[in-house]
Amino acid sequence: MSFPKRDFLICMCALVMLLTLDYTFSANQVTNGYGVLELTNSNKTGPLKEGIFHMSFRSKIDGSIQPLIVKVPKDYTPEKDWPLLVTLHGLGGGPIIVPQINSMVQIGPFGRGDKWYRDLGEKDVFECIELAGQIFNINPDRIYLCGFSMGGAGTFELGLKHPDTWAACVPVCGNLDDLALVENGNNLPFWINTGSADKVVPAKNSRKAFQQAVKLGFDHWKYTEYEGVGHSFSVDWDKIEKWLLAHKRIQKPSHINFYCDKPGRTYWIEITEKIKKNGTAKIKAQIVGQVIRIKTTNVSNYTIYLDSAPIELSQGLVIIENGNEIFQGSLAKDGIFKRNHKDTKVDKS
């Protein structure tokens, strides 16, 4: 008996809808540990066990359904906290993980496909991290970032634009357009990997970023160029895994470099307003004892969050900005110092 084509298409559509429901959950629904995961497990036997799972989530930003891939390590248990590895795919690809790494929970966001992990693509990555933290017991000081090709570029950018999120970063066959961003990595270890025979993203792109780090005196940055290897994600993951696990996020660094194109926060310093709207801004902040030295470029206003800084709140402190003492006293009441240059003429153009 022949099966009508129309009926076949209807059945296939229904199957796709069921599969979508089976693998879809909303970030704001994941409040009960493994409860929602029971719906996403294709075996319907309870919480996700060891393995790789293709899933999706509903974006809180625009309500769209976005895919991701999750790898649950062997012997995962919520009774202890786990490292998280975020893996970014290349242009034209889909969510990926690193099969060779088995000591961490892994997530591979889609990042809206070809958006280079910027704008909505960037927001999706951080929403996936938030989601992973709701599903799994993740150690916030052991969140690592890696990526291949476009994902390597995303690893450079997201790593350096948000250095206080990560414990360490591994870009593979990537590039960094704005080398000035390397300054932001003074507290964040990078291990750059590339192939000498890469014709898609030549090794010189990775080499330039590393050379900038060397120029800045960053001895916590590493570089490996695989002789004769082309555009490939096949690097020495065994060594990289051990290197990653040796690093934890630095929570309260004494010295911060923050270069950005828009206001934002990293660690205990936040740029709240620029002088020239269209220009980049830079702030260098260093704490020695109870003295905070600030050097600014194109920064009108900023905030210091002392409860997140390596300083003793119960004691008096001194703040020196661009060589001038601007504060001396105690901020123990709320632990926040807000700098507002009322006399600064702000260019809104």
Image: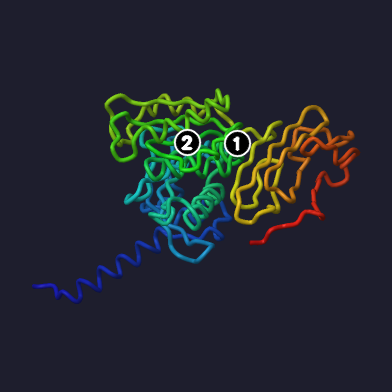
Residue that lies at the very extreme toward the left in this rendered image: 1
- Identity of the residue drawn at 75% across and 56% down: 345
- Identity of the residue drawn at 39% across and 29% down: 237
Q: Quadrant of the C terminus?
A: bottom right
Residue 11's tag is: none
**Residue wearing tag 2:** 104
Residue 248 position within the rendered picture, expressed as x and y whole percent measured from the top left: 58, 31
Dot 1 crowding, Cα within 10 Å, few <14, some 14–19, many 20+: some
* Image quadrant in which you'd find residue 73: top left
Residue 153 position within the rendered picture, expressed as x and y whole percent measured from the top left: 43, 42
Secondary structure, mark 2, is loop
- Identity of the residue drawn at 66% across and 54% down: 276
On the picture, is 68 further left or further right than 28?
left
Dot 2 crowding, Cα within 10 Å, few <14, some 14–19, many 20+: many
Residue 329 position within the rendered picture, expressed as x and y whole percent measured from the top left: 91, 38
**Residue wearing tag 1:** 141
**Relative to 23, is 214 above or below?**
above
Which residue is at the front of the view, 161 or 169? 161
- Residue type highlighted by circle 2: Met
Q: Quadrant of the N terminus?
A: bottom left
On the picture, is 105 further left or further right than 248?
left
Residue 37 position within the rendered picture, expressed as x and y whole percent measured from the top left: 47, 53
Upstream in the sequence, badge 1 or badge 2?
2
- Residue type highlighted by circle 1: Asp
Front of the two marks 1 and 2: 1
